[in-house]
Image (tube, rainbow, N blue to C red):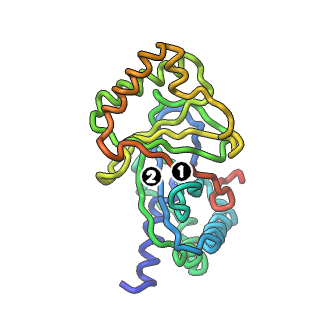
Amino acid sequence: MNKTSIKLAAAAALIWTLPLAADNHESEGSYKLAIHNVHVKMGHGAGFKAGMEAYSACLAENGYKDSYSVWHAVDGDRTSYHIVSQFDMWAEFDEEDEISDACWGNEEIRDGVFDHMASWETQYAKRLPDWSGDAEGYTVVKLHNFRVDDGSDFRSLVGEITGYMKEAKYEHMGSWYSVIGGGPWDADYFVVEHFENFAAMDEKRKGANGVLTDAVGEEKAEQFWDKFGDTLVDGKGYWSNTLVKRDSMGYSPKD
């Protein structure tokens, strides 16, 4: 397959999965996320940014109604971006997307994005409202990822700790998601911790352990975390990464 064919195939894949529906973390209930983890070629960050901005400008010029957000890695692989969109039903993948198709059909826009990409992977996740709080006005997030060995005990323990957090009306509750599909080294669950900006990361928060300790005491809290650790796979059962929102690269009809 030549380079032009590869770029056309890549554009077609993103047409199917990028801006499916509004990226609205405030909505209640359960919804799904399409998360595209894009790796940009070293030194191509500015070019990729310009390409994504051109794509979002094209959507705006043509009155596109859906939205997506773009998040840049702060730690770990700094060439990594997360492009996130929200959808409710898998049937939305069957819908025609004429405006997005036309924008990707513009060779300058398409090349402006894909010429700077090294790779991308797509994953899907489902929001778990019973474990989640309501967050708004945030530009920095920390993702806490879990690979689970004992799903039943993991869900029971997370349900217990989030119950204590809701009972305490803890204002910094995260948003929990279960991963749909994925490979053997992907997370099974992740929780999003939200911050208004980087300065907010300097603030002292009670956190899950503080809430739990207040509710059951230090000894039982320690026992709880021992049990929680036992539910995770040996080795890389937990990891975290921090992302910052890049508004100019994303798109929302209200922007």
Q: Nearer the viewer, residue 25 or 167?
A: 167
Residue identified by numbered label 1:
21
Considering the image in quadrants, where does the C terminus appear? bottom right
Residue 121, compared with residue 238, is above or below; it is below
| 61 relative to 145, above or below | below
Between marks 2 and 1 in the image, the one whose residue lies nearer the viewer:
1
Q: Residues within 10 Å of mark 1 (few under 14, many from 20)?
A: many
Q: Residue at x 58, y 51 (%)?
A: 243
Report how many numbered discs are placed on residues in the image.
Answer: 2
Furthest residue to the bottom?
Answer: 2
Which residue is the extreme one toward the top? 216
Lower position in the chain sequence, tag 2 or tag 1: 1
Residue that appears at 59% across and 55% down = 74
Could you say where residue 6 lies in the image, as x and y percent from the top left? 42, 79
Q: Position of residue 105 (x, y in %)?
A: 54, 76
Q: Quadrant of residue 152?
A: top left
- Helix, strand or loop at label 2? It is helix
- Callout 1: SS: loop
**Cβ atoms at labels 2 and 1 below 8 Å apart:** yes
Taking the spot 64% from the left edge, 57% from the top edge, the residue there is: 251
Q: On the picture, is 42 further left or further right than 122?
A: right
Q: Position of residue 252 (x, y in %)?
A: 65, 53
Q: CA distance from mark 2 to mark 1?
A: 9 Å
Say which amino acid is labelled 2: Glu
Nearer-the-camera pick, 112 or 81: 81
Give the vertical position of 84 relative to 52 (above or below). Answer: above
In the picture of the structure, the residue carrying the numbered disc 2 is 92
Residue 194, image x, y percentages: 60, 39
The amino acid pointed to by label 1 is: Ala
**Circle 2 crowding by C-alpha within 10 Å: few under 14, some 14–19, many from 20:** few
Question: Which numbered marker is on residue 121?
Answer: none
